[in-house]
Image (cartoon, rainbow, N blue to C red):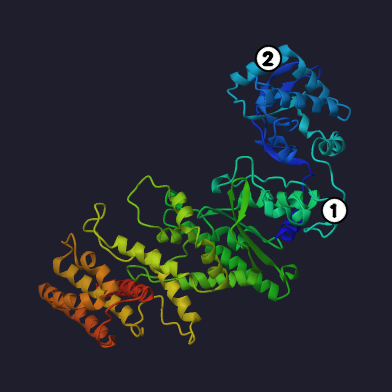
Amino acid sequence: MLTELYTYAQKRQLTARPGFKEKSIKGYLSLTAQGEFLDIVSPLEPTTLAPDIGTVANGTSKCNLLVDKAVYILQTDNKPNTLVKHTFFIDGLKAGAGAEPLFAVCAKALETPETLETMRGALAEKKLKPNDPIGLQVDGLPIEKSERYYDWWESYRHEIGEEKKEATQRCLVTGQITAPVRTVPKVSGLIAVGGHTAGDALLCFDKAAFTSYGFSQTENAVVSESAITSVNAALQELIAQAPIQAGVKMVHWYKEPVKQEEDVFANFFGAYAADNKEDADGTDFARKMDTAMAAANALIQSVKKGENPQQLENKYYLMPLSGANGRMMVRGWDEGSYEDLYQNIKLWYDDLRIVLDDGSGTCKSERLSRLEYRLLKPTQSASKNLGKQMAEELSGIQVRILYSILHGKPLPDAVGKQALRYIRSHMLVTEDNKGGERNPDLCACQLLKAWIIRKQRSSEKGEIFMKEAVNHDYPSDAYQCGRLMAVYAEIQKSAYKNRLNAGVIERYYTGASTTPALVLGRLSSLSQYHLGKIESEGTRVFYQKMLDEIYTKLNPPLPTALSPLQQGEFAVGYHQQHAEIYKSKKGTD
């Protein structure tokens, strides 16, 4: 993992100089070459590359040079540690003045009481807070952007930090003999998934167990300063562009660069779009995903023809990340060939594909997050944060679902059970949905279909009975019972012409889908009564033929109880039969 991140940074020339870090900045104390304070000016960019001393700055006596909190640079309060850090900042400028004369200009201005007080007043006028990061510039040049102090900084930061160790251990990343960096610098970008505002470290050692054999801190997992700088540079870029899925940043990359349209992962992961009016129905996602899959297939075919030999051994890497108390939590790791990635994601969408409610075609590709929404517990709270709920409830199965998708393996049983829970909760009468037409949720049915198909594929026979549309010969009484339930519901709707607040679905779906023997007999009697109320003889014959066909596929006696898998077959059977009814009705209109 470390080696692949290091290689990514090297190939893309992302490596920053050791001892530097990309930092946020809110303003610059602007000075003339004579040290006269002009004003606090806004930065052209929200971040800047500046010197960084790592965790040493978290103590009570030292701070970062050139760019740090305004409270330390301007000593905005009289706390003892603020005065110590303010003095340290000025002493650092003086120490580097021999390499960069602009440092001396800044140090003199900060030591002049009148100028310092003017700067503090300007800070208040600009409505900047004491904890906001600021820097200094002279004649319009931010001093951290000068390159003349680099060599001085390399030696100075070791003087003010821990004593540098001799190169006696082998770096885990490069394999070279090196002196281990004592503490690993932190990387920002994980705040949205539990990360710390100051950043999070990939390697951490603060427990007694890590002092075995006399080793301390990173002596247990040796990395050189230059290597970890490259790794962090890669992480910084990858985290920034990674989408969030169920409370986790889906960090991914490829061994060999691919074009944007060939990046299958880029579209596969996406935030839940319930509030995105432009893509509320997922149409834009489906279009982009189809385009990406077509481009990926074209790339694979070109490789097989020898047109892109550099892509022959291309691989993908997936590393879901979150933060916890200043540490990066690696939620999983997966790697594989680019071609396998394409084939398995294609298989995933093939397994999900199912007929639409009205039978007019099959569903489009759906983003994973929209599907996973169907795995959440029903909630009546409108203020419930969806992202937080997904992070809390799906963190335990998120990685397992991804592994199943990326390797074409069976889905966790929790997927089927939770999708069934979603369907049952939405088939009931609620205050928000009185008298509405009730059908099993399409996305939940997609998940159930994929869950069932993958179980069938992994069985000893490997025979797949589940199809996109209704399978009249499906060898499962549970599936046929679901079909039967759909016909009973349509017969009642036709008899009462949709003038029902609560019909057989609202009253009996849950019971029929779990204990069909106890419910379907009663519904069979009701259906005969309802058929008698239908005025059109053609409609009565239409439904009776469906009932007769399904009855011939059932093996009496009906099941007394259905397993979760059979309940899934029941739900999909209901959905597909409902779609066939509507398709047949359109054909006779």
As drawn, 538 above or below 395: below
As drawn, 554 above or below 90: below
Q: Check the image and name the residue furthest to the top.
A: 114
Q: Which amino acid does label 1 sit on?
A: Thr
Residue 440: x, y in percent?
32, 66
Q: Name the residue under label 2.
A: 117
Q: Residue 200 carries which label?
A: none
State left or right for residue 289 relative to residue 6: left
As drawn, 341 above or below 94: below
Badge 1: how crowded within 10 Å, few (<14), some, or many (20+)?
many
Q: Give me the residue at 45% from left, 49% from top.
A: 276
User: Taking the image as drawn, is residue 272 in sight?
Assistant: no
State left or right for residue 469 relative to residue 560: right
The image shows a total of numbered marks equal to: 2
Q: Distance between the residues labelled 2 and 1?
A: 47 Å
Q: Give me the residue at 61% from left, 67% from top.
A: 296
Label 2 or label 1, whichever comes before in sequence order: 2
Residue 292: x, y in percent?
57, 63
Q: Nearer the viewer, residue 75 or 469?
A: 75
Q: What residue type is labelled 2?
A: Glu
User: Taking the image as drawn, is residue 567 in sight?
Assistant: yes
Q: Disc 2 vs disc 1: which is toward the camera?
A: 1
Q: Name the residue under label 1.
A: 178
Which corner quadrant holds the C terminus? bottom left
Q: Quadrant of residue 158?
A: top right
State left or right for residue 176 relative to residue 358: right
Q: Give me the residue at 50% from left, 55% from top.
A: 246
Q: Give me the residue at 68% from left, 45% from top.
A: 186
Report helix, strand or loop for mark 1. Answer: strand
Q: In which quarter of the image is residue 532?
A: bottom left
Report helix, strand or loop for mark 2. Answer: helix
